[in-house]
Image (cartoon, rainbow, N blue to C red):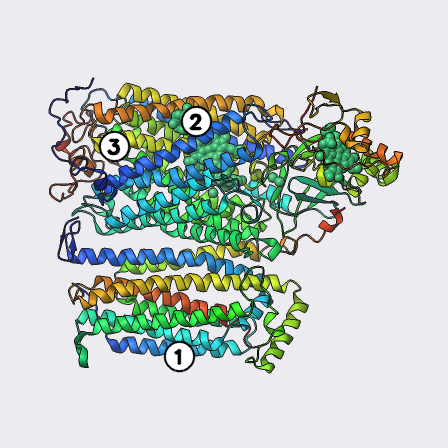
Amino acid sequence: MHRTGELYGHFETLEQQKETATLGMWVFLVTEVLFFGGLFMTYTINRHAFSTAFGVGSNTLDLTLGGGNTVVLILSSLTMAMAVWSAQVGKVGWFGIFGKVRWVSIFLIATLVLGTVFLGVKVVEYKQKFDHHLVPGRGFDIRYRSEHPTASDNPKEIAAEKEELEKAFAKDPDINAHAQLYFSLYFGMTGLHALHMIVGAGLLLWLIKGSFAGRFTPQYNTPVEVVGLYWHFVDIVWIYLFPLLYLIDRHQ
Amino acid sequence: MSTTPPLPGHQMPHEDYLNATYGIRSWLLTTDHKRIALLYLGSVTVFFFIGGLLATMIRIHLLTPTGYLVTPETYNKLFTMHGVAMIFFFLIPSIPAVLGNFLIPLMIGAKDLAFPKINLLSWYIYLVGGSFVLYSFATGGLDTGWTFYTPLSSIYSNSAVTPAVIGIFINGFSSILTGLNFIVTIHTMRAPGMTWFRLPLFVWAHYATSLVMILGTPVIAITLLLAGLERMFHLGFFNPALGGDPILFQHLFWFYSHPAVYIMILPAMGVISEIIPTFARKPIFGYSFIAGSSIAIAVIGFLVWAHHMFVTGESVYAALTFSFLSYLVAIPSAVKVFNWTSTLYKGSISWDTPMIYAFGFIGLFLIGGLTGLFLACLGLDIHIHDTYFVVAHFHYIMVGGAVMGYVGGLHFWWPKITGRLYPEALARIAAVTLFVGFNLTFFPQFILGYLGMPRRYHTYPPEFQVLNVLSTAGASILALGYLLPMLYLTWSMRYGKVAGQNPWPATGLEWKTDSPPPTENFDVTPEVTWEPYDFQNRPDLGLTAGAPSLAPAHGDD
Amino acid sequence: MSEHIVSPKVYIVIFLALMVGTTATVWAAYQNFGQFNIVIALAIATFKATLVVLYFMHARYSPKRTQLVIVCSVFWLAIMLAMTLTDYDTRTPRDSRLAPPAISHLFRA
Amino acid sequence: MQSQLPFSPDQASNFAPHVDDLMLFITLICLFFAVAVTIAIIIFFFKYHRKSPDEVGVPIHGDSRLEAAWMIVPLILAMGMFGWGAVVYVDYRHAPADTLDVYVIGKQWMWKAQQPNGIKEINELHVPAGRDVRLILASEDVIHDFFVPAFRVKMDVVPGHYNTMWFRPTKPGRYHFFCSQYCGTNHALMGGWVTVMEPADYAAWLSGSSGAEANPVVAGEKLFAEKACVTCHVSNGTGRAPSLNGVYGANVLLADGSIVVADEAYIRESILQPNAKIVAHYQPLMPTFQGQLTEEQILALTAYIKSLQSQPVPATGAGIAPTTEKR
Ligand code: HEA
Ligand code: HEA
Ligand code: CUA
Ligand SMILES: [Cu+2]
């Protein structure tokens, strides 16, 4: 295809091109909704059937990390939205030794940093689950942590966990298998979400490069806008994942 | 033979999309929707060939009650690989990715699809998915049935399930991207004057198909991903031993796979809706009803999936709901059949090959669709579920319907694609052969099914032998019927008569450019000022005689 | 070009609302509402998601067509969830899910 | 009794006539539409055949009344099919009170049934005519499906779920049952026979066989399990040893190329001196049972092996079939 400036040859106008790209991204997001939807379906049916096990599994998650990550991700959505805005108005600012920098670059970098923080925290959480033998597979053992406490563990917490597990086993003797189901879903859902974040981070890098090259102007900022849509969508998925995974039976 | 004189007045255009550039690279890196369509044509044909070969082996094996050819394991692999190759890698991409890709931009007066690079990408994704599946076929095959029911597929099967599942997962994205591209293209790339209700019905059908593709395919992708993960890491979503539920897999699977049957039939219906008015030379009867019924099928089609699960122990209420909705989806199909038939009334009907395929389609789709009503009937499905009745039902629709539509469409647009005509007499013979062979193959299977022969049986009680032999006999005629078009269509690419812009003539925008079209499709962006399928007010078609002397009898619109 | 530019003020207000929502879900999770815990959690999540879609993703200012696309996605998700649940929720107890067959030991000779 | 459709299996349960009537009803409606459309097409095809090459058809764009008619009429008929089908189905899914309950377990690739008094059967099911029978279905591995064409009933056997199905056999006789949910390699062999007996015969059969040891076949079956014969002699031939289904009276091809007739003597020898005659394609794995079985037990085992006649005939796949040939 021949390109003239930012207009691809098979479009008549920039406006048509932008409309097309945005609609394309929206339609893509629809497919994403249903893609995650299959997982949510699996989650629903299993949570329905094994509510005790899901509660037990959920209570092993670290609420501070999860909640903190929620804040980080929402903040990154804000910076992403601001990036779109700065591209639309073409705002430029002075940044000391860096000189004149476009705000869109700043906000994109901020988004990328926040996204990376999110992924970093996720790594920490996954590591914990590994240490506690909560990764589905042969070694999975929901009791492992309460039976092998480490020096850094709070003895009171461990005792509480032990008690909770006793009760759960009394209710559901197969709790180990069913809790494993919870963790399969936990890793499946957060893993898929993280994968989307990684793809998003790649797109952000590409945008940042473009923004330093001055590609995004008030006339042409479709890529920022479209990637923004994607980033917000990933945020929305997390908005659901957080209560569904972290907040089951917390009141007990 | 090699120097067929061009028809008077017709000459191959000077430069077209085929000869604009040369070399392998210019094909493998093309973003031209027409070339990508041809890439797809080649690759789906390969899979059709593989699927057909496997089908032939199935039929030979079933000649005798104890099985003639292969071991039970191998037989199970034959029908599984046959189903997988035919459904996921032949029929789902066939009409959309070949004819749809080629024609949608032409029909709406665009230079290309909205996202040409994504279009190419989706072909490559198809190839990658296809390679995984072929790898699975080559290294131990696949014996789960095309439905991959758990826990057989996720725990018990010893065959190469994992690569196959990965392959179908990957291939799903090809389908999604194609659907996405079509939807966006139809929304934003229409030429001036090409309003929604001037769109050819082929485009409407593809719009509906694309809806199903983008709304359904992601679900099968995630489902197979979960089943694959379960197989690899023993996660237990669908494994009752670990608390999972095998029925959940079926819900998720059919949430896609029932609508997917409309991915296969809707485009074929679109083809028929183009062929019939062209060869009856009159506007299609009830344009808006046909257009609307495509959308209705796509939407209602999403509400019926659990009719595949009537005897799984599904709740009775759910069964009643799904049966009821399955009958509703028959109504828009009925609307189409009746409108096509009415279009013939007072037409000027020619017996060209595409028209013969269209008649074949109506007849066979009718039988296939009507037998769907037997299956949707709760009381009856208890008896005929998972028997050869089901096999006959879906082959009538998919082979008799969709494949007939595809082959008919290939003939109809062949002159546009290649610039040359196929040999007419041979083509008619092939069409009739296919029709006869098809019925002989699959009609006996209805009877077999009602008599109680279960499907996926490598051996069967001897009382079923006669009907099986009939079916195998039919299949050999059928194979011959497919061989013919493959040969003469290839032949005609080089030696066929030059077709000219509009050989039939037909009314669509695609016929207003050269055959084969130039790379940019139209020299100037066309402006549409006529209604669809209007032969009366189109002097450019050169039909001077007009209608027989009857007052133009308009309906109520 | 009829582009609508949302002002940063709106973005910040929405961000704050989202923070409030997050706090609210966590708070609600620690209360015992019985059956309604999950309902409340999902209601808050949906509220938050709606804000993101409407403002961060500009759906409020988008053409009808885009809004239709969004509605479709939600609608189809609802079809999948609701109709599958019609099966699960109306099964008779005996047909419901159990551990591996409790009677099979009878046949292990 | 009801008239039978020309292409239908035996009618042997209360559901069979209903399902056949339903079939007839739907077939007639569908035939009507199929014939009507086909005739219309054929008539139009010839009547409006193009007379001159540049002739055009009459432009008729549509007719809303017609459209309405052909939406509403099929809809009404479809509701008829739905309603009738629903009635039969709801009946089928709600077993009457006071049924005779038989447990049926499917596993790759055999069926086991247990009668109310504890009698077990493999790939066989005995039921009395005229009595409401309910099968409680469970699976040990994958999904199977219990299908009796002559009864017009089937139900999936799903691991992790109990499904039930019921029917009232109406006609004594022996009817095929099949596994009709694909379940792996020997899905096609996973079938057997339902024997419908007069109630008196059924009672006699029950008590006859419940006297366990009194009935040599039953005793043999028990031994066959106890002495672990089943672990190698899997009924469908997938085990390390040949399937014994139908072996009695058949010609057996031996490893040395000779052929023997499997009579009582041969079976006895096979049990006591297994390595004397090795079946072709099999390894001499079988341990000797000399000194471990009483004569009575050997008789019982032989009787049991003789009774294994009615099993489905295995296919000729390598490693699957016993290399036996029926005369
Ligand atoms: C292109 C593919 C395709 C299409 C279009 C259809 C269309 C339909 N199918 Fe089919 N079907 C399959 C492919 C397809 N099917 C496959 C592959 C399977 C098996 C999967 C497997 O298990 O491997 C299957 C299985 C299947 C089952 C499950 C059977 C079982 O396993 O027990 C059922 C049950 O309801 C069913 C019903 C229908 C119905 C009601 C339609 C309707 O859409 C048909 C509508 C059309 C008409 C009705 C004809 C036109 C109407 C008239 C002329 C008017 C008269 C009408 C009335 C009186 C109402 N199909
Ligand atoms: C698009 C879908 C599609 C198509 C086109 C076909 C085409 C055919 N199918 Fe298939 N079929 C399925 C989809 C399809 N099928 C599915 C989904 C299943 C279920 C699988 C499962 O249970 O999991 C199935 C199962 C199935 C069975 C049941 C197996 C069983 O349950 O045990 C049978 C048996 O007869 C069969 C036969 C045929 C035949 C004879 C053709 C013929 O129409 C094929 C004719 C085509 C050719 C022969 C190739 C082209 C010809 C040439 C290139 C000429 C040269 C070749 C030769 C001379 C051999 N198919
Ligand atoms: Cu068991 Cu098929
Ligand atoms: Cu279906």
Do circles 1 and 2 both sit on a common chain? no
| Pointer 3 residue | B413
Read off the chain for label 2: D
On the question of residue D106 being in view, the answer is yes
Identity, as a three-letter code, of the amino acid under mark 3: Trp
Q: Which residue is mark 1?
A: C20
User: In this rendering, is residue B334 above or below C93?
Assistant: above
**Residues marked 1 and 2 touching at CB (< 8 Å):** no
Comparing C38 with D185, the one in front is D185
Crowd rating for badge 3 (residues with CA inside 10 Å; few <14, some 14–19, many 20+): many
Chain under label 1? Answer: C
What is the distance, in whole Å, between disc 1 and disc 2 at their CAs?
A: 67 Å
Number of marks in picture: 3
Q: Secondary structure at mark 3?
A: helix
Give the x, y percent position of residue B446.
52, 29
Where does label 2 land, which residue? D35
Residue D11 to residue D93: above or below: above
Q: Which quarter of the rendering shows the C terminus of chain B?
A: top left
